Each structure stands twice: as C-alpha cells, then as structure tokens.
Image: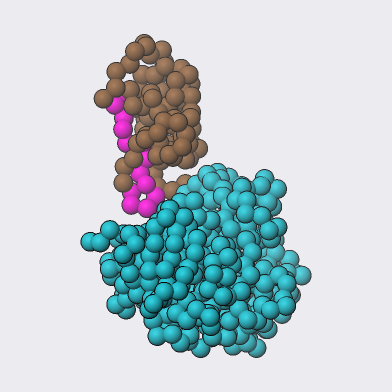
Amino acid sequence: MSSHGSPWDSFDVAIIGGGMVGSAIGFGCAERGARVAMLDEGDVALRAARGNFGLVWSQSKGDGMPAYAAWTRQSVALWPALAERASTLAGRDVQYRAVGGLTFCLDDAEFAARQLFVQRMHNQGQEGLQMLDRHQLRELMSGCPLGPEVRGASYQPADGHVDPLTLLRGLQAGMRAAGGVHLPGASVESITPIAGGYRITRADGSEVSARRIVIAAGVMTSPLAKMVGLDVPVRPVRGQNIVTERLAPLLPLPASAIRQTGDGTVQIGVTSEDDGSFETATTTAALSRMAARALRVLPVLAQARMVRSWAALRPMTPDGFPAYAESRTHPGCFVATCHSGVTLAAVHAGRLAEAVLTGTLPEHARDLHPDRFVGMTHVSSH
Amino acid sequence: MFRRTEPTDCTIEWEGRALPARAGESLAVALLAAGITSFRETPVTGTARGPLCLMGACFDCLVEVEGAQNIQACLTQVTPGMRAGIQHGARGFVDDAA
C-alpha cells in the first residue's frame, strides 16, 4: 500500500467530506472502478449523519420543487437493493424496513392542513400518499396504544426507516472494499489546479492530488465550494433528538419525529433551529416540547426512561432543497449538499457517482443547480 | 468471582431464591457477590448480559425489581427482603388508555 496522504498520492476522485453524502458518492465511485480518497475531518466534524432520524422518506419531500420530489422517489425505489448491499458490507443488518410511513395529526386543524399538503403533493406526482383517519390508522396498526388526541395521519406505503449509523458504516466499508482510502483527521485548506487535475492541501500539511473532486462537506460546504468557484450558501440548522430505553414493540410504523428503532428504542425528534449558530448543545425547552408531543401520540411513553439526547447540525440551502453542480471554472469539481443523506443515499451511490465519473449530471439533479439561489435569502426549512 | 470484605446483614430474593446481602450496597454488587453474572437477556438476540461499568452508564445490568422493569441494578440500593429477577427482553407497558 502507498503511504496515504503523502504528496505523491494521486487519485481519480477525492471526496471532501466523510459523512452520509460523501460516503455514498465515494462508495459509488469506488465500485465503478475509480481510485477514491475520502478526505474527512474525523470525529470533530459537525456531521449531520449523527443527527439523522433514519427515515427513508418521500412523503414530505419536494413541495414546490418537483425535481427534488422525483429524485427522492427514484432513490426510495432503489433503496431495497442498497439496503441489502449495505447490510452485507457493514456486517450487520442496516434494519431497513419499508413498512410505510406516517405523519401524525393531533387535531382537526392539523389534519386539514395535512390533507391540503397531500393534495398538493399529488399534483406534483406523488403517488400512494393518502390521509388515514383515526379509525383507518387503528386498523393499520392494531394494538398500537395511540393517544386519544391522534386524529389521523398521512400515510405513504413506500416510506420506511433504517439505522443511519449502520448505513454509514456499510457505505464506508464498501468504499474501502472497492479500493478506496479513508483519510480522516484534517480539514481542507486549499484546492489548486494542476496539470490533469487538482492539488488539495490539508490543515496537517498533507497534500492529495486528484483528477476530480466532490465537495460533500455538509454545513462546511460554502467556503470549500468557493475554492472551486461555486457559490453554495448553506446554513447550519440544529436538530435535537431524544432516545428512550429499549422497549417491547409498540409503534409498528415510523413517523415524522417519532419512530421505534429495530433495537426497540424510541427515537423522538426533531427540532429545526435556524439561528446561524454552530452550537450543538441540547436545550431543555426544546427537548420537553418534543417529549410533550410524543406523549400525545403515545401516552404510554410517560413510563419510559430517556437514556440520551443530542443535537446535530443539518446543512440547509436557502430554499431547503439539495444542490448539485459541476464548477464551470474548475471542471471536474462537483458540489453535492442536502439534508436527506439517508433517503438520497441510493441515488448518490448510483446515478450521482456515475455522473461524477462521466461529467454529466443526471436528470433531476441537473435541475437542482445552486444558480437558483442567486438573490434568494434563506426562507424555510424542509 | 468476587469475595466480600464485609459481613452480610440481610437477605434478598433473586428469581425466588434467597441470597445473602448487605443493606445499602448496590443490588448489582450483592448479586455479583452471590455469584450471579447473568442479569438480563437482551431484547434483540436474547443473549445473557451482566454489569459492565457499575456506574450507571452502560445499561447492561438491567433487572426487574419489585415488578418494575429495566431497573439499573448498579444504581439500586439493597433493602432487606428486596425481590428482584432477570429482565427478559425489552420492557413492556401496561396501556392504561386502551
């Protein structure tokens, strides 16, 4: 083996960022025969993958951006195959369960608002998504101790959930198994064009050269994208999480902001705090609000112990949708950023990885170019 | 595996069996001193587990105490006559609302 990170190392593709997005693209490029280096900050990185809720989810994605909705549905369709391979590569089950997904409505106003949303999504090509009233919900999940306030839910049979950390492990293992190298421990300081590619200089003084570069650096995307002439405004949006002790099965379907994992813990999410801060502490006020809503869905959780809470930062573009681009000034340099790294992992490891190697972004991804952000201020969180 | 340095002064009940213990010590210590190393069966694979950290962090010493499930034995003080048993799998609930 070569001495990783030495000035003499040259790769076909350097991925900047070792989170969910970078690992999926790196895995996809490596298994297509490219020699891949994944440059990663390591444990200090502000990884959105850490705070990911583990939903493989189409029902709420892409209202107002049909390309994103279609890109998401494409990924969801490819997920069963990815799950099987990621489980093999991780050495354990990624616990992908496409059992359908719910968004609970706790009163008539929430139900009516969700119904309108479902109609809008239908008009944008979302199939299968439907509203279930309380009676239909109880039929779907007989034995689930739903609280009396649960009025109904939106239901997408194609949605599901997965263990995001095992997925991350599987993607990275897959990249290494296909000859890729993972180089953690130093941030990237500069990118310089050289003959036949680029030289990347890192904070520890090491250099890596590569013919192509993919910037998949989550909340740190903006300054790196600037190095290759791309303007990709990304803000950190904090999400807090709660996890309970392991419990006997009580919630058979995952839902927005509440799911029972394959190991029995109940994960309760998730805030969307857009205050521009890179702080990752939790707050009692937010955690208690999240817990209070979870108790309205499943009152028996009042008996459960919380074992852990944590926060992570998700990268948010001005309109909340992903951004993909190849640089015009630095050909062969790409940016990929989104906050749905789990749901989109299948297209990232597939068509997007292929695009990095061929230089032509696929349909849908092409429509998510960051040029659309010009003159836009951050408006919403999706 | 372990040898007591202080005398016992009471008994507790583990899986219906009387064990010598010392009031105020942790239940985990009392069980280990009595040679018990399997405290629970895991929810996922049913494998036997016992205490690892003895300081409240690992959740591997979960037992049932007086009918309450998922109790950390290392954080529970022995009281004379205390009844405890193996935590089998994941904790279940009584649904009062149903």
> Which residue in the rendered view is the most extreme toward the front?
A195
**Residue furthest toward the right?**
A109
Give the answer, above or below, for where A351 lies relative to A200: below
- Which residue is found at the position 31% from the left and 72% from the top? A35
Position above or below: A31 against A280: below
Seen in the picture, residue A185 relative to B61 is either above or below; the reply is below
Q: Colour of chain B?
A: brown
Q: B70 or A170, which lies in front?
A: A170
How many circles with numbers are drawn on the protein? 0
- Residue A349 image-quadrant placement: bottom left
Q: Residue at x 58, y 52 (%)?
A: A311
Give the camera-side residue of A20 and B33: A20
The image shows residue A198 at horizontal and vertical percentages of 42, 72
Q: Is residue A8 visible?
A: yes
Q: Quadrant of the N terminus of chain A?
A: bottom left
Write down the colour of chain A.
cyan
Q: Is residue A268 left or right of residue A361?
A: right
Q: Quadrant of residue A323?
A: bottom right
Identify the residue shown where x is 66% and y is 47%: A283
Q: Is residue A143 magenta?
A: no
Magenta residues, dominant SS class? loop
Q: Position of residue A360 (x, y in %)?
A: 46, 87
Q: Nearer the viewer, residue B66 or A331?
A: A331
Residue A106 location (% of width, % of height): 70, 64
Residue displayed at 33% across by 69% down: A10
Residue span colored magenta: B34-46
| Residue B42 lies in the magenta stretch | yes
